Structures are given as structure tokens and as C-alpha cells.
Amino acid sequence: MVETQHWRVDPQAAGLKEDLQIRAAAEGIKNGEIVAFPTETVYGLGANAESGEAAQKIYKAKGRPSDNPLIVHVATLEQVRKICTDISPIARKLADTFWPGPLTLVLSSRGEVSDSVTAGLSTVAVRMPSHPVARALILAAGVSIAAPSANRSGRPSPTRAEHVLHDLDGRIYGIVDGGETGVGVESTVVDCTTTPITILRPGGISREQLIEAVGTVAADPAGTRPDQTPKAPGMKYRHYAPVAVMYLVPSGMKRIRELIDQEKNNGRRVGILTTEEHKSDYPRADVVHACGKRSELESVAHCLFHTLRYFDKEKVDVIYSETFPETGIGRAIMNRLSKAASGRVVE
Ligand code: AMP
Ligand code: MG
């Protein structure tokens, strides 16, 4: 156990790169320590990407399987060129269109980042975050930062500092607390070494946005099929799971009310994942949580991981969740919900 340092930073403040809190965190990264920090998607747990030893600390703190590579976070295109070869015109177009932002590009590795970061693959996943605190930290550290989400493996990703501390207090050197993150689901991961490019994980940039930018886009079919090995190693693992057993209910509110009645008759404590529009429609449930507004799917993404952690706090036995249309950011929402439910669906 270590004493985890807690640095509070206002993301809107001017001159963040020189901020004393950021400099203390950057110093930690330079010295091979691991530090959690906010990005526009979720909180990341960062280490110097050039240090295998530092990266190993991330796997250990998270309990992350060692074959699941980390995303390298950069602040400049120069840092990308330093770690990747063959930045194709399409990759360049994606970077120009969506960076800084919630898009991760899988490119050929130059071998500069540690094997522990790439899990020994010949490719490396790179992203330029837009969050001012993340950018300032990378620039102040002067190195690219390898960072997965700052949760214990298998748990919902953290969108608030309290989520990070719940999972990792005493296991990490420090946390830069910049308040709540924005997008709320992780970046879209796109493999740029295939023609056409392939979506390995849906996320903050939608398939529609990618198609508009570069035309043809494929999706990794194995990413959604439990019997096949997906190309993003992380997609095969259990993820985002709340403590209670969770089910998705695509057939709607009436069916959910029947399920609540059944569970209550068996003496179980029931949680319902719904939205503002329907939060009054489940009077018999023990915990009804409105996860944003159905009419604004971005707001659902923003609240999603907090909602899953909220049900843990409320100690429900079972969670039933409404489902969402799989368009735009809805694909990322349904991907995370379906994993949180380990694929359980009530017809
Ligand atoms: P996380 O940082 O935990 O949100 O997960 C990052 C995702 O990117 C995981 O699913 C990884 O398996 C995937 N990933 C990272 N590097 C690569 C790579 N070089 N090739 C394919 N997938 C990758
Ligand atoms: Mg993760």
C-alpha cells in the first residue's frame, strides 16, 4: 500500500502546464510512477510509455491481463511520428478530423514504446486527448503516456475521481482530480493497418462520423461474437460489471414491470436503469436510476458508468436495464451495457 496523492485541478484554469499540482503529477510519471488523470472520455491510469517497468505497475494495480495492450496518449503529432511508422493518408485524415478527441488509432509500431505497453504486438494504439488536464500532464511530463481506464479490471470505467479512489486508493502514486469527465464512454478504437479501416471498439466517435470522414469503414465481426477472438485483445474480457446480476430488456417497460413484480415476490432488491423520460414508470422497484435522457443519447453515455457504480452503492440484487437504439453513440452505449450484463438479455 502507498499513500495515494490527491491533486485537485481546475480544468478551465489558465497555464495548466505550469500548475504546481500538474507538475507534481508529471514528475511522478517521469520517475516511473503511475498517476490517474481525467480525459474527455473516462479517467486514465498513466505511466511513461517508454518504460516497461512503469507500464508493469499499471497491469499490477488494475489486475489487468498482460496480453491486453495499453493506449498511448500524446499531445503532439511529433510524438505520434516518434512511436509509429506508416501513418497512411487515411490515418492522417482521421487524426486531422478527430484529434484531439475520443478516437484511438492502431498504427504500426516503431518499437519505441515498451513491449509491456503493446503486449508484444507489432502495432500500437495512439490517441490525442482533448481534455486540458490530460494535455497539460502529457506536455509537462515531456513523454507520451500509456493509459488504460483507471478502474480495477472488470469494473465499470471511472468518470469521477471518487470512482478511481474506490478502486485504486493505496495502489497508485497519485490522482489528478479534474472533476467529472465529459463523454463518459471510452474512445473508439480503429485499426488503420487494414483496408478499409476496421472499428475494433465502438466509442466516443460514431461509425457515422468515421464514414463521413473517410468513406468505407468495416467493423471487427468477432468483437461482438463470444465464440471468436476479437482483434482488440481487451474486447474478449469481462468488463464494466456491476456487483449485481444485470439483464437487458429490449421489449420495454411493461416487461420490466412484470420482472419487478416477480423479483419482489421473491424478496429481492431490484434496480432499474432507465432515463428521465421513464423514471416514474417503475413504482414497485427499490432503486430507479435515470441515466440521462433518452432523447439525448450523449447524456446517457455521460452518466452510464456512474449509474452502474450507483447500483453497487445501493446494494441491489438484480438490475434490469432498458436498451437504446444502436445508432451514433448508441452503439458504444449498447456495447458497454451488454458487457456489463455479460450478454444477458430477457426476451
Ligand atoms: P482501455 O484502455 O482499457 O479502455 O482499452 C483499450 C482497448 O484498446 C483494449 O480493448 C485493447 O485491447 C485495445 N488495444 C490497445 N492496443 C491495441 C493494439 N495495438 N491493437 C489492437 N487493439 C489494441
Ligand atoms: Mg478499460
Image: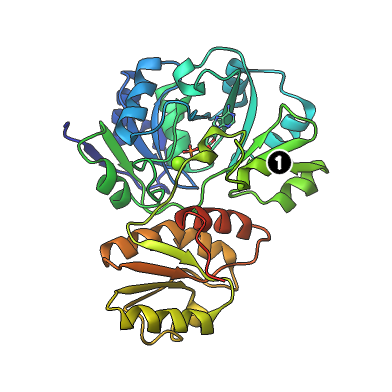
Seen in the image, is 19 located left or right of residue 238?
Answer: left
Residue 260 vs 311, above or below: the answer is below
- For the point 68% across and 61% down, the residue is 327
**Quarter-wise, where is residue 192 in the image?**
top right
Residue 214 vs 311, above or below: the answer is above
- For the point 52% across and 39% down, the residue is 236
Is residue 228 visible in the rendered structure shown here? Answer: yes
For ligand 1, tell me if the residue under mark 1 lies within 8 Å: no
The x and y percentages for residue 310 are: 33, 63
* Observer-nearest of 332 and 18: 332
Seen in the image, is 146 located left or right of residue 242?
Answer: right
The x and y percentages for residue 183 are: 52, 53
**Quick one: label 1, few (<14), some, or many (20+) residues within 10 Å?**
some
* Observer-nearest of 293 and 316: 316
- For the point 45% across and 27% down, the residue is 145
Seen as rendered, the residue at the extreme top is 111
Residue 46 vs 207, above or below: the answer is above
Is residue 19 visible in the rendered structure shown here? Answer: no
Q: Can you tell me which quadrant of the image ligand 2 is in? A: top left
The x and y percentages for residue 206 are: 67, 51
**Quarter-wise, where is residue 101 in the image?**
top right
Residue under label 1? 97
The x and y percentages for residue 204 are: 59, 50
**Quarter-wise, where is residue 252 in the image?**
bottom right
Seen as rendered, the residue at the extreme right is 215
* Observer-nearest of 149 and 138: 149
Residue 125 vs 329, above or below: the answer is above
Count of labels in the image: 1
